Image (cartoon, rainbow, N blue to C red):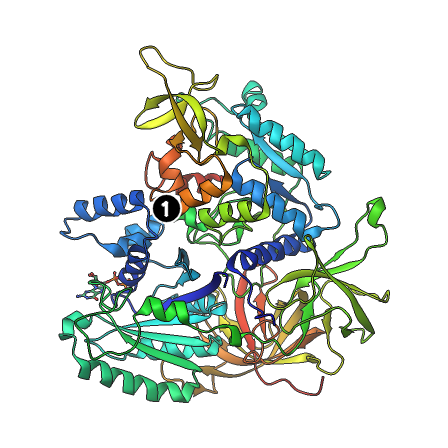
Amino acid sequence: MPMDLLRLATAGSVDDGKSTLIGRLLYDSKSLFTDQLDAVERVSRDRGNDYTDLALLTDGLRAEREQGITIDVAYRYFATPRRKFIIADTPGHIQYTRNMVTGASTADVALILLDARKGITEQSRRHAFLATLLGVPHVVVCVNKMDLVDFDEGTFDAIRDEFSEFATRLRVRDMTFIPVSALQGDNVVTRSERMPWFDGSPLLSHLERLHVASDRNLVDVRFPVQYVVRPQSYDVLDYRGYAGTVASGVLKPGDRVVALPSGLESTIASIDTADGPVDEAYPPMAVTITLTDEIDISRGDMLCRPANMPNVSQDIDAQVCWMDESATLMTGRKYAIKHTTRWARAMVRELSYRIDVNTLHRDETADSLALNEIGRVMLRVTQPLFVDPYQQNRQTGSFILVDEASNKTVAAGMIGRTHGGG
Amino acid sequence: MSTHILSELRALEAESIHIFREVAAEMQRPCLLFSGGKDSIVMLHVARKAFAPARIPFPVMHVDTGLNFPEILAYRDRWIEKLGLKLVVASVPDAIERGFVKEEPNGSRNRIQTPVLLETAEQHRFDALFGGARRDEEKARAKERVFSFRDEFGQWDPKNQRPEIWSLYNGKVHLGQSIRVFPLSNWTELDVWTYIATEGIEIPELYLAKERDVVERDGMLYAVNVFTPRRDGEAARRVLCRYRTVGDANLTAAVLSDADTVAKIVDEIAAVRITERGATRGDDRTSETSMEDRKKEGYF
Ligand SMILES: Nc1nc2c(ncn2[C@@H]2O[C@H](COP(=O)(O)OP(=O)(O)O)[C@@H](O)[C@H]2O)c(=O)[nH]1
């Protein structure tokens, strides 16, 4: 079986040991280079540490180093013979929600770290909430610093039980608990002999074996047209292909498809790639589709199956996470919206409530969303979008809002219930 | 029955193709920066796939420092012709002659190539430049976005970058501003080589091991050629070596290696335990943060 790709987002409060854990994964899986290690050893020595601080390996830009904090998502890579891993390392602090939303948006697994001595904090609840809000299919909770609680089974069990109970309210699909010591390496890559009572896998083998194939939506065919391929060269003059990335579902030549928004139907003639035609296309393949009929299709349109269409609507009900520090979301404001490959304009018709990400309390009196705040909004869009609920489809259920003056990306949106029929 | 799982290389390739198409669809005047290095070779290869059977719908820019290995220039010209593309050359020697930039005392053209690159991009009003940088290359790049926003001066401000959520890229810019786009962001050095091997991509032979005359300076091996002639008192020796990166000929060192095929390079990279920049680039060793400083000025 070929090696596949697993995307991981990490979350932890400051000092819970996240950098150490990631450093340990890179170190023990031999994904580190000797010169990186030398640099870290040198800095550790300069700082007067008597051990090599693995946390320094994942340390970022100089400005942040000088302030002694990390404030942005950083990406790390490591591979084992089974899998390649992409870690979106999302650090703590005030900008945390924005960072975690970014990292979790594409993640297959959220890795939540907590300190065994402190147990569950408001922040760990928030991490679990954000992971579910962003539809991350698997959550792994690492109870770290087990060495500081004498590798005590009871401590671990208590944390696990309390967290599990909280998580049932969030409807987490798959949640696993692992007792670890990032500093000493217990249950990170190798099984800990000091916690014989733990019968689960160490973190790395768990991540290697995690079954993610069934997380993908292979049922609802959604193909947002990204680019129309029209070669000008003589030998392929009549070629007209619709290039894009399969959002969900499986497409095959001969399949009947309908193009949105026109509603015109046709049949897939071929699914092309630069390496020749293929028998089927599934997510996240990037292909070019040709149809048997000449119908007018352009970027922003969507191909799907006549009997299984997304909701076509100008009214969007969504949870949004506000990501901009210089402005707030307010009722009546207008933004550019990007959904799949389609841009439009959207007006905030209503802010139904703001969610307190720590307590999950809904504040219905809220009239704005500031940086890192999450709320439920009703949007009116200038053109119909072809949407599915985010929890069913992360591709067709997500959008971003962009400030029309500054061009900054100011919000991430997850579509909730969709109205009307498709 | 198909498992409907893409291998990691195909998943990376699909992500890169998606990025190319997104930029071609949304930006006014994109351009691909081609250095002749393995990353830009892979980038060009993936760009071709993104638009097949049509041609790549944007030109290619080469920042010619005047210190190129001749093999690289020949490779560049061959591929530009094969793919039917337009080549834009940003010439550093010309810029020196015009007095636009001044040669640095140490002979490195790393810093002075940045203004030349920016000038050429501005003349052609390019609003998106594809670069082959990868996030695993260097610390300052681990946080780089796929769409990296640059102000009117081509500068990168780490504090003023847009969040990238899902694959919903935002390339909106005001006149004069631009983005750098890194389609290979999530590839590692090993991915690049495995891909070259899997796809059978032709590479310049500098990357393959061969007997070359070298001199040793500061623990690095420099091939003896017109760019790095033997200095007085230096003894040249003949060793089996290859290049892991290909930058300016006067700065790029070779590494001892017997990998004379791409398959052997893949094995070597899989086993090797020193980063490519640390091994072969005299320019990056200056300080831990030199890359970050160069990026701020408008370099990749
Ligand atoms: N005893 C012990 N200390 C740890 C463990 N993991 C991390 N630490 C220490 O906790 C401190 C914070 O760790 P760090 O990785 O920087 O935390 P971060 O802020 O979550 O990235 C450092 O002093 C680490 O050495 C562990 O498993 N056991």
The spot of residue A125 in percent (x, y) is 34, 80
Q: Tag 1: residue type?
A: Ala
User: From this viewpoint, is residue B107 visible?
Assistant: no
Quarter of the C terminus of chain A within the rendering: bottom right
State the residue at coordinates (41%, 67%).
A9
Q: In which quarter of the image is residue B6?
A: bottom right
Labels in figure, total? 1
Residue under label 1, please give it. Answer: B271
The spot of residue A391 in percent (x, y) is 54, 80
Q: What element carries label 1?
A: helix
Q: In this view, does B184 lie above or below A337?
A: above
Q: Is mark 1 within 8 Å of ligand 1?
A: no
Ligand 1: image quarter:
bottom left
Q: Which residue lies furthest to the top in this view?
A: B232
Q: Mark 1 Cα within 10 Å, few/some/many (few <14, many 20+)? A: few
The spot of residue A352 in percent (x, y) is 53, 85
Q: Is residue B280 above or below residue B201?
A: above
Q: In this view, does A24 lie above or below A202?
A: above
Please give left or right for residue A255 compared with residue A62 in the image: right
User: From this viewpoint, is residue B258 visible?
Assistant: yes
Closer-to-camera residue (A204/A101): A204
The spot of residue B78 in percent (x, y) is 66, 32
State the residue at coordinates (86%, 64%).
A294
